[in-house]
Image (spheres, rainbow, N blue to C red):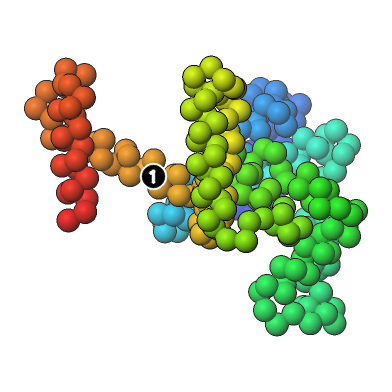
Amino acid sequence: MISFKSKSNYDFNDLLEIMDILRGENGCPWDREQTHESIRKNFIEEVYEAVEAIDLKDNTLLCEELGAVMLQCVYHADMAEEEGAFNIHDAVDGVCKKLISRHPHIFADVKADTSEQVLLNWDEIKKQEKGLSTYSDTIQQVAKSLPALMYAQKVQKKAKKAGFDWPDVSGAFDKIDEEKRELMEAVEGKGNCEEELGDLLFAVVNVARFLDIDSEEALTRASQKFVRRFTAMEGMADRPLDEMTLEEMDKLWNRAKRMEQV
């Protein structure tokens, strides 16, 4: 323990040893209690915090958050080793083998001069490795734990490879109109509102895909824009917002919107 505190720099092996200590017989009570399931959300949060550091172009923060993501990888691998399933070295071995096998244009004699060809090769090798023989197999392989918009967009891209797609974006726009009508009918008691809203969102994602826009990022930016304008609106108000009428707040909202566009 003392030797660890006296070090000025640590490496990956130190991280592995520290995790063994924390999870060991005389380790930290909290760390010893954790399971794959109990810290699942921590993994997701750390990845998103690393992504935010990328968006902010903050390399200091990115370095910190990549360390946090690495900790989660080591944490899960340590628990798996305790279960007799695998260890961190097995995980590293597996990803190295995957990189080598899926880059035959680098590590073998396959030719791939463009990024498009690289991705085609990657998909074909992945299908062979995982025994995916049908288009349905590839769609079902998309991780269901992804954020909903991202999941929808990936599913749609897989379906497109089978030719199940509109010729152009006009068909996707028409589908939005159709799903909107069905949602309005559901609101009037002629259907399932949740199901029809889901269909409408799925249709909107289809338009995003045709326009080569990441729907997850587009919605995030729209939400952030709302936060900025709401904050500006409240800053311009002469009294608390909950004491104002919707019409008064709408005027301030439009002022905040105009200020952004200047």
Q: Amino acid at mark 1?
A: Ala
Q: Is residue 131 visible?
A: yes
Q: Could you tell me which quadrant the N terminus lies in?
A: top right
Image quarter hosting the C terminus: bottom left
Query: Crowding near pointer 1: few (<14 within 10 Å), some, many (20+)?
Result: few
Q: Quadrant of residue 191?
A: top right
- The structure residue drawn at horizontal position 49% and vertical position 21%, both measured from the top left corner, is 187
Q: Is residue 17 visible?
A: no
Q: Position of residue 257 (x, y in %)?
A: 22, 45
In the image, 131 versus 166, the foreground residue is: 166
Q: Position of residue 160 (x, y in %)?
A: 70, 57
List the residue tagged with mark 1. 222
Q: Nearer the viewer, residue 196 or 8?
A: 196
Report whether 127 appears left or right of 21: right
Q: How many marks?
A: 1
Relative vertical location of residue 191 with respect to residue 146 in this rendering, above or below: above
Q: Who is closer to the viewer here, 115 or 44? A: 115
Q: Residue at x 47, y 55 (%)?
A: 54
Q: Is residue 237 or residue 261 the one in the foreground? A: 261
Residue 243 relative to residue 201: left or right: left
